[in-house]
Image: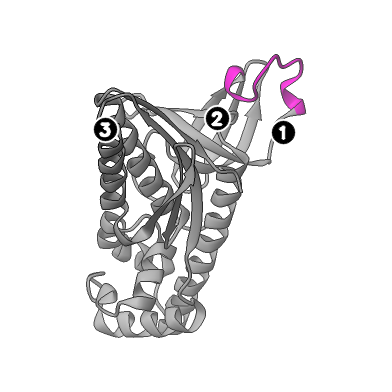
Amino acid sequence: MLLKKKGFPEEDELVMCTVTKVQFHSVFANLDEYEKSGMIHISEVSPGRIRNIRDFVKEGKKVVCKVLRVNEEKGHIDLSLRRVTETQKRNKVDETKQEQKAEKILEFVAKDLNIDIKKLFEDLSENVFKKYASLYDFFQHVVTDSNAIKDAGIDVKIAKKLEEAVKLRIKETGVKIEGKLKLTSFAPNGVDFIKEALKRAEEIGKENISIKYLGAGSYSVVVNARDYKEAEKILKEASEEALEYVRKNDGVGEFIRAET
């Protein structure tokens, strides 16, 4: 990717990486979205015993990793390949393509106004990344809310040209992910506890979540959101809220993420 985020990634964040060096017990990779590099220990490359690490990774290969640990003081970032599901990998690849599309829009505006693209990105970054997960996420908000561009803190002339370019090239879209909650309560008024658990989950998801009864204590949980990062966050927080409430009230439960 052309443009880099400042600072360090967060733990559990999914990052697109480029493998730079493969050793006997470890792999080193550059994080495409940051001016940072990280290490993948052989135990985090793939489940099971690995005879030859190069059967799984090679220099120059693009891989999606999960951030395990970040030590900002030492500048160390530990990554994992094996903890990334196929669904997460596909979603991250899609997000990367979206971000590249957003960068192209920024590049077009910068060229049209004869300004430096990296300077434009830095000016946007100061306010945009405080509120939005990515440049593309910000542009999606611009499509539906004209006030979003005003909050970006950039010159009025640039803001106008950027809004025009964004609305011309990005259409309002969304993503859907789902899973299944299994809830059981052994309390005399267990039905009420389960209803309350589901209510709490819906309150977290608000208009983005839909919960339907499937039978035998199972419930379908569907989340619609602007992008996968937001959708995954809502699904995780809502399911955890329901499970925690049921477990605190003489019950058991589990959440199964649907693979798509």
Which residue is drawn at the image coordinates 36% and 68% (left, top)?
120
Task: Look at discs 3 and 2 and give the one toward the viewer.
Answer: 3
Per the rendered image, the range of residues in magenta is 43-55
According to the picture, the residue beneath numbered tag 2 turns out to be 83
Q: Secondary structure at mark 1?
A: loop
Mark linked to residue 245: 3
Estimate the x, y position of residue 143 in percent, counting from the top left: 39, 77
- Give the CA distance from mark 2 to mark 1: 19 Å
According to the picture, the residue beneath numbered tag 1 turns out to be 58
Estimate the x, y position of residue 206 in percent, counting from the top left: 29, 57
Most frequent secondary structure within the magenta stretch: loop
Tell me which amino acid carries mark 1.
Answer: Lys
Q: Secondary structure at mark 2?
A: loop
Tell me which amino acid carries mark 2.
Answer: Arg
Could you tell which of marks 3 and 2 lies nearer the N-terminus? 2
In magenta stretch: residue 154: no
Assess whether mark 1 and mark 2 are in contact (beta carbons under 8 angstroms): no
Near mark 2 (Cα within 10 A), the count class, few <14, some 14-19 or many ≥20, is some
Q: Secondary structure at mark 3?
A: helix
- Give the CA distance from mark 3 to mark 2: 27 Å
Residue 64 found in image quarter: top right
Task: Look at discs 2 and 1 and give the one toward the viewer.
Answer: 2
